[in-house]
Amino acid sequence: MGIVNQDNITDVVIGSLGQHGTITDREREIATGIIKHMHAFIKDVKLQHHEFLAACDYLARAGQLCDDNRQEFILLADILGIEVLVDMMTNPVEGNESESTVLGPFYRENPPVLPKGASTIQKHFDNEETAYFEGYIKDESGNGIAGVTIDVWEDAPNGVYENLDPDQPEYNLRGRFETDENGHYAFVAVRPVPYPIPDDETAGELLRFMGHHPNRPGHMHFIISKDGYRPLISQIYDADSDWLENDSVFAVKQSLIGKFKTAAKELGTDLHFEFDFVLKEGAAAQAVAAE
Ligand code: BEZ
Ligand code: FE
């Protein structure tokens, strides 16, 4: 500890860590990193006091927006590419396992449990293109895994998720499916369309501050889970969608892009999308970290 000046302030603050209470090695590592990088950032941009006060006011307003339907800080982290980077640190791709990407704010627990091949569509739109989605969930050796739970959700053809649209039925375009004895999954849904993430309030302020747009390419969300395997939170992307190379939340991975094809007549849909996923044996990353 000591009297501070511009040169020693960072070392003085880091030196205070754990002086008046026990902290874990991980807490020390994270606190040291925050102090070091924040101080470097402030010196780098020569942050002025009125800018600091504006940032405090901004964060206070973001906090006031948070409720069960809106988690503003995740949204801000997404706009800054933070959530996707944290996900890549948490779930590094090893071997041939499928890539994960951000969960996003629109997942709902306990979607309707539907039989293989069923439709998630509860309301039709004039501009919809129906699609038959199917594929295999495999282990790293290429064997199909039976009894895998698959939650899927997407926006409607008007670009809005059901829970944000009073004109859509509850849980429209959401479902929970299970793979059959060969690891095969299938369901009917619509071709997801590009949509803007919420761009009002502080999320919109950040987008404008960055001179960026709010749009995401068309994508279907997946959570794929089975005991004994690492759960996979991911999305598949329409290769022909706008915004694929300029996603507002930087979540597109090359390996998650697939192609909608015209469906064979017997499928009964306009389009057909085939996509396989590979799960890695193991437990959830959080459980592994806690061991
Ligand atoms: C989404 O894909 O649903 C999403 C992801 C990040 C921020 C907003 C939306
Ligand atoms: Fe989404």
Image (tube, rainbow, N blue to C red):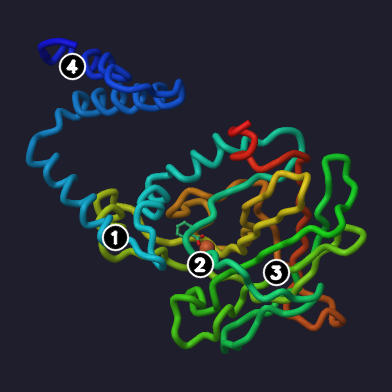
Of helix, strand and loop, which one carries label 1? helix
Of helix, strand and loop, which one carries label 3? strand
The alpha-carbon separation of the residues under discs 3 and 1 comes to 32 Å
Q: Which label sits on residue 9? A: 4
Among the two numbered marks 4 and 3 on one chain, the one whose residue lies closer to the N terminus: 4
Which residue is tagged 3? Answer: 176
The reply to whether dot 3 and dot 2 touch (C-beta < 8 Å) is no
Q: Residue at x 42, y 50 (%)?
A: 78
- Residue 258: image quadrant is bottom right
Q: Which label sits on residue 263? A: none
151 to 77, vertically: above or below: below
The reply to whether dot 2 and dot 4 touch (C-beta < 8 Å) is no
Residue behind label 2 places its C-beta within 8 angstroms of ligand 2:
no
Q: Amino acid at mark 4?
A: Ile
Which residue is tagged 2? Answer: 194
Q: Amino acid at mark 3?
A: Arg
The reply to whether dot 1 and dot 4 touch (C-beta < 8 Å) is no
Neighbours of disc 3 within 10 Å: few (<14), some (14-19), many (20+): many
Among the two numbered marks 1 and 2 on one chain, the one whose residue lies closer to the N terminus: 2
Of helix, strand and loop, which one carries label 2? loop
- Whole-percent x and y of residue 130? 68, 79
- Residue 17: image quadrant is top left
The alpha-carbon separation of the residues under discs 1 and 2 comes to 18 Å
Which residue is tagged 1? Answer: 204
Q: Quadrant of the C terminus?
A: top right
Among the two numbered marks 1 and 4 on one chain, the one whose residue lies closer to the N terminus: 4
